[in-house]
Image (cartoon, rainbow, N blue to C red):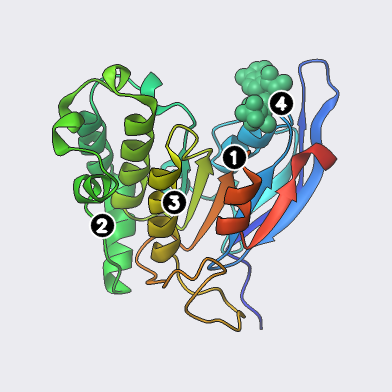
Amino acid sequence: MTSPPLLEVQDLTVLRDNSSPLFSNLSFTLSEGEVLVLRGVSGSGKSTLLKCIAELNLYDKGTIKLGGKQSREWDIPDWRIRVGYVPQRPSLLPGTPLEFLSTIRDLSARKRKLGEDAQEGGEVVDSLDLAQDWGVDKVLWKRDWGTLSGGEAQRIALAVAVGIGGAEVLLLDEPTSALDAESSEKVEKSLLGMLPPLRGSSQNTKNNNNVQRKGTGPKALIWITHSAEQADRVGTRSLDLSQH
Ligand SMILES: Nc1ncnc2c1ncn2[C@@H]1O[C@H](COP(=O)(O)OP(=O)(O)OP(=O)(O)O)[C@@H](O)[C@H]1O
């Protein structure tokens, strides 16, 4: 028997306030090692789709499964640990990144999942070290989110999402939109390097960006970007929501 896809979205439909569809009957699967790039004009529903997959947004029809099990059969905290959403504007969060990290570290759903991963030999990256590798000084973690620059807040939010561990799929909403080209490519390479090798790929340990994959982070990514160049660099596949 073949194993179910890592993530499966079936017939997903979201209606706008006026009942016309934002997107309808959207179906796709995501396998281990994949980076699905989401494209589409502003307002085509890219962020809404990510929030639906994270079960943060209601949808009108459809099902979402992780490892063959429907989202609604999971406890929501368990789902949200496995399917991590990194918002476009983390600076709207209250308090400091350090407080945010400590709240998330205490979640029982996270501890349960990390317990399972430890049995599978999982590895957790330190968020502060990771953000430092991306050029974010550790002192910034003690400042309120609202006082950080867009690029600082973005890198910290990403480092939290990766470092808390447990995410099988990370949903990235324009994760480098506030970064300069050099910082952006550094973050891209680091995120791609944490993925496992692409299943069924002839280049088993590299993706199309020639990044050595270590498999120490999430198993797959869905990545919104408005940049065609970034889509080329990071994507193994793309989906254009303007066409749905
Ligand atoms: N909470 C909400 N209530 C009502 N309408 C919403 C809500 N959130 C989003 N929308 C609307 O849904 C549509 C899709 O928004 P969404 O943010 O998903 O688009 P997007 O493709 O991510 O856009 P962008 O590229 O500009 O970030 C927009 O028309 C938006 O105004």
Q: Earlier in the sequence, mark 3 or mark 1?
A: 1
Q: Is any part of residue 244 visible from this angle?
A: no
Indicate which quadrant contains ligand 1. top right
Indicate the secondary structure of the residue bearing disc 4: loop
What secondary structure is marked by label 1?
A: helix
Q: How many numbered callouts?
A: 4
Residue type (three-letter) at the residue carrying disc 3: Glu
Of mark 1 and mark 2, the one earlier in the sequence is 1
Q: Name the amino acid, label 2.
A: Val
Establish if 202 lies above or below 3. below
User: Which quadrant of the rendered structure holds the N terminus?
Assistant: bottom right
Going 60% across and 41% down the picture, which residue do you hit?
225
Residue at point 63% right, 67% down? 5
User: Residue 43 has which mark?
Assistant: 4
Q: Give neighbour class at mark 4: few <14, some 14-19, many 20+ (Cα, 10 Å).
A: few
Q: CA distance from mark 1 to mark 4?
A: 13 Å
Task: Classify residue 119 as left or right of residue 175.
Answer: left
Name the residue type under label 4: Gly
Residue 113 in the image, given as x and y percentages of width and height: 34, 57
Q: Give the class, few, some or many, for how many residues have Cα within 10 Å of label 3's Cα (few <14, many ≥20).
A: some
Would you say the beta carbon of the disc 4 residue lies within 8 angstroms of ligand 1?
yes
CA distance separating discs 4 and 2: 34 Å
Q: Position of residue 75 (x, y in %)?
A: 46, 45
Disc 3 element: helix
In the image shown, does 166 or 92 lie closer to the viewer? 92
Marks 3/1 in contact by CB < 8 Å: the verdict is no
Query: Which residue, given by chain and number where applicable, does mark 1 sit on?
Result: 50
Under circle 2, the secondary element is loop
